[in-house]
Amino acid sequence: MRRTYFLLLLSCLWLVAGCDLIDYHPYDVRIEGETDVNAHHIAEIEAACRDKETIRFITMGDSQRWYDETEDFVNHVNQRDDIDFVIHGGDMSDFGLTDEFLWQRDIMNGLRVPYVALIGNHDCLGTGEDTYRAVFGNPNFSFIAGRVKFVCLNTNAIEYDYSTPVPDFEFIENEQTARADEFDKTVVCMHIRPGCDEFNNNVDRVFQHYVTSYPGLQFCTAAHEHRLFEEDLFGDGVMYYMSDCMKHRSYYIFTITPDGYEKEIVHF
C-alpha cells in the first residue's frame, strides 16, 4: 500500500512539473519583462510636462488583490485625454510575492499615460522590497513635472523595525535643494501618513517640519487605509489626501495651475 501511494505521489509531482505549474520559489526575485519602471516613466513625464504651466495627474493606491478592478481603472483612465500621469500610492502586492508585482506592473503598463509606483507596507513583506527595487526602483525618489517637484517617500516604518531610517530624513533634506532652479512648487507623496500606527510617530512632527520646508508645498498624498478621506493632520493648513483601495473603485484627480490647485474625486 505504501509503495502504491509513493508511486502515485511521484506521478502527481511529475505531472505538475511537466505542466510548468511549479516554476520557482514565489519569493525568488527573478524578473521577467520590464525593470526600472519608475525611471523610464519619469523620463516620459518630465519630457512631456517640461514647459507646462498646468499639470493634471491621478493618485490611487492599494491594488494588491483587486486585479479586475485595477484593469477597470486602467480602462477608465484611458478614456480620458487630459491626464499627464498617474501616481500609484503603494501596495501593489499582498504578500510581497514576485508574481504579484509583475501582474500589477503588466496591468498598469496598459495605461496610455506614464505612471510611477510607491512602495507600500505589503510590498515590503518577504523579498518584496528586493522585487520592488528590481521592477520599479529606489523606494525614495523624486521627479519634476512642469515646475512642480514630486517627492515620493518610503514611510513604512514598522516593516523595518528601526533597522534603517524610515522616513529617510537625509533624502528628504537633500531633495529640498536638489534641482532647486527647476521647481517652485512641491507635492509630497507616501503610502502611510503620519498618525497611522505603521508610521514612525516618534518623528511625526519632525517629518512635518521637513515637509513644510519645501518650496511652495501644495499638499501631501497617501493611501494605505482603504478609505477615501482628506485631513489637515497637523492643523497647519497642509492637507493630506488619502486614496481608497481599488476595491472601492475611486481615484483622485489633481490639477495644479499657477494660481493653486483643484481636486476631483472620480468613481468608476
Image (cartoon, rainbow, N blue to C red):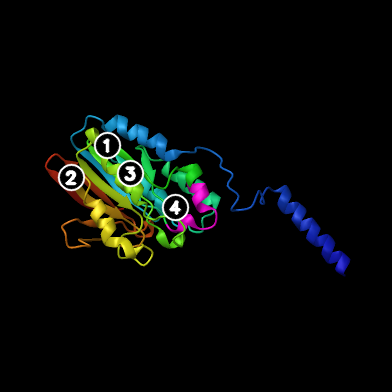
Where is 124 relative to 145, above or below?
A: below
Task: Please tell me whether mark 2 sits on a helix, a strand or a loop.
Answer: loop
Q: Give the range drawn in magenta.
A: 121-132
Left or right: residue 103 compared with residue 141:
right
The Cα atoms of the two marked residues, 2 and 4, are separated by: 30 Å
What element does badge 1 sit on? Answer: strand
Q: Main secondary structure of the magenta part?
A: helix
Marked residue nearer the N-terminal end (2 or 4): 4
How far apart marks 1 and 2 lie (CA) works out to 14 Å
Distance from the alpha carbon under mark 3 to that under mark 4 = 14 Å
Q: Which label belongs to residue 86? A: 3
Amino acid type at circle 1 is Ala
Work out which quarter of the rendered image holds the N terminus and state it.
bottom right
Of tags 2 and 4, the one toward the viewer is 2
Closer to viewer: mark 3 or mark 2: 2
Instruction: Write down the residue under mark 2.
Output: 216
* Residue at x-position 60% and y-position 53%: 26
Residue 135 picture location, percent across and down: 49, 43
How packed mark 4 is, by other alpha carbons closer than 10 Å (few <14, some 14-19, many 20 or more), is: many
Q: Position of residue 112 (x, y in %)?
A: 36, 37
Q: Name the residue under label 1.
A: 145
Marks 3/2 in contact by CB < 8 Å: the verdict is no
